[in-house]
Amino acid sequence: MVARHRGAILNVASIAAFGPLPGQAAYGAAKAFVLSYTHSLRGELRGTGVTATALCPGPVDTGFGEAAGFTKEEAESALPRVMWIPADRVARAGIDGLAAGKAVVVPGRVNRVSAAFFRVAPPGLLLPVLARSHPAMKRS
C-alpha cells in the first residue's frame, strides 16, 4: 500500500552540520543535530505520507554574521564568494527539494562538494584550516 502525500517538514540545518566548526562549535553541533533529527524523522514517518527534508545551505547574506558578532566583511572573507547563495535561491532549493521528497538539500554545487568533503575528511585535517579562516578564531 502506498501512502498518499499528507504533508512535509522542512528543517533548516547548514553545511556546518557535516563537519567541525571551530569558532561556532555550538552552532555546528546544533545544525548536526537538526540533520540527524531529520534523518530519524524520515525513518519514523515512513509510510505515513509525511516527508522530512533537511535544508543545508552554505553562507547566505542574511545578517547572521553581524548577529553572531562579526562584521559582514569578516564573514565574507572567511568563505569564498562562490559559496554564497542568495536567500531566494536557497528558499527555492528548499521548497523544490521538499516537493521532490529529498532527504537533504544543499544549495550550490560548491557547497555540495564541501559537504561531501566534510563527510570524508578526518577532523584533524579540517580543524586547523577551519580555525584559521573563522572570524571568531582570528580574534583569539
Image: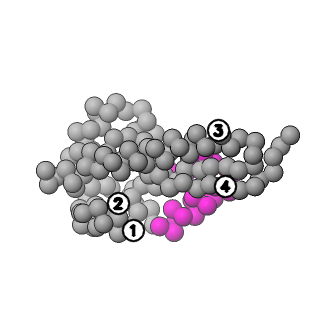
Numbered label attached to residue 62 = 1
Residue drawn 24% across and 63% down?
69
Category of crowding for the residue at label 3, using alpha-carbon neighbours closer than 10 angstroms: few (below 14), some (14–19), many (at least 20): few
62 shown above or below 51 = below
- Viewer-nearest of labels 4 and 1? 4
Q: Please, what secondary structure does the residue beneath circle 2 have? A: helix
The answer to whether marks 2 and 4 mark residues whose Cβ atoms lie closer than 8 Å is no
Numbered label attached to residue 43 = 3
Mark 4 or mark 1, which has the lower sequence index?
4
Mark 1 or mark 2, which has the lower sequence index?
1
* Cα–Cα span, label 1 and label 2: 15 Å
* Cα–Cα span, label 2 and label 4: 32 Å
Q: Which residue is mark 4?
A: 8
Q: Which residues are magenta?
A: 87-109
Numbered label attached to residue 81 = 2
Of 77 and 68, nearer the camera is: 68
- Viewer-nearest of labels 2 and 3? 3
Q: Please state, as top left, top right, bottom left or bottom right, where the N terminus lies in the image.
A: top right
